[in-house]
Amino acid sequence: AQKITQTQPGMFVQEKEAVTLDCTYDTSDQSYGLFWYKQPSSGEMIFLIYQGSYDEQNATEGRYSLNFQKARKSANLVISASQLGDSAMYFCAMREGATTDSWGKLQFGAGTQVVVTP
Amino acid sequence: GAGVSQSPSNKVTEKGKDVELRCDPISGHTALYWYRQRLGQGLEFLIYFQGNSAPDKSGLPSDRFSAERTGESVSTLTIQRTQQEDSAVYLCASSRKGGYQPQHFGDGTRLSIL
């Protein structure tokens, strides 16, 4: 079964506008972590932001913020004031059983391609 | 450099040959992960190492795939008797201990099987 679902295969957004990328997840664990990565056309995976399941506040990192709705099992990424350099594929990922002493794989969604237009 | 280093960056080989992919993690990162990314798709987990032991090999697609790691250093992913469906980008990542720690990725090895 798909653990991470990203329903938007692609999006266009105008420069300086905000964009929301959807991510829903499926887990029965109480302790888990959610990560967002950016993959430009050059191929490298760039870590953007993290949200822990026990975090009471939504994570923010510069122009990136997470709209975390635990009951709905969603962790949507919001990019404010889009820039041309934000054009990339964006992946949502989850690590189940995430504690301070754990490791463990990330499970990735299929990604959302974002194109920022002038 | 300070990042995860992978080599080669590109590999083209004939079907049936064996290939070895190398990953050099960030110094001090205990955990090392291998993923595969087929064209236009998300990342598919293969295996991860905690030090030089591999607690989770669940993603290795067949017994043609194997990996090893020397201590908390270099890892090699070996694919024997390559098939055309093995064509993909193979990404390595490393991280510190802790479920909240992000994984830092290398630039990948693009493997093409003719």
Image (cartoon, coloured by chain):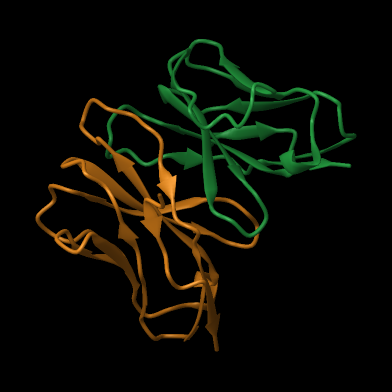
Chain colours: A orange, B green
Location of residue A58 with respect to B3 vertically, above or below: below
Closer-to-camera residue (B113/A49): B113
Question: Which of A106/A13 is in front?
Answer: A106
Q: Residue furthest front?
A: A1
Looking at the rendering, in which quadrant would you find the C terminus of chain B?
top right
- Residue B63: x and y, percent? 65, 21
Return the residue nearer the eye: B72 or A7.
A7
Q: Residue at x 25, y 35 (%)?
A: A97
Task: Please state which of residues B70 and B43 is positioned toward the viewer in this rendering.
Answer: B43
In screen coordinates, is B86 left or right of B15?
left
For residue B83, say whether it is visible.
yes
Q: Quadrant of residue A100?
A: top left
Is A14 drawn above or below residue B103 in the view shown?
Answer: below
Location of residue A62 (image quadrant): bottom left
Residue at 37% across, 50% down: A3
A69 lies left or right of A47 = left
Position of B48 with respect to B108 (left or right) is: left
Instruction: Please provide percent x and percent y for residue A102.
Output: 27, 27
Q: Position of residue A8 (x, y in %)?
A: 45, 73
Q: Is residue A31 left or right of residue A75?
A: left
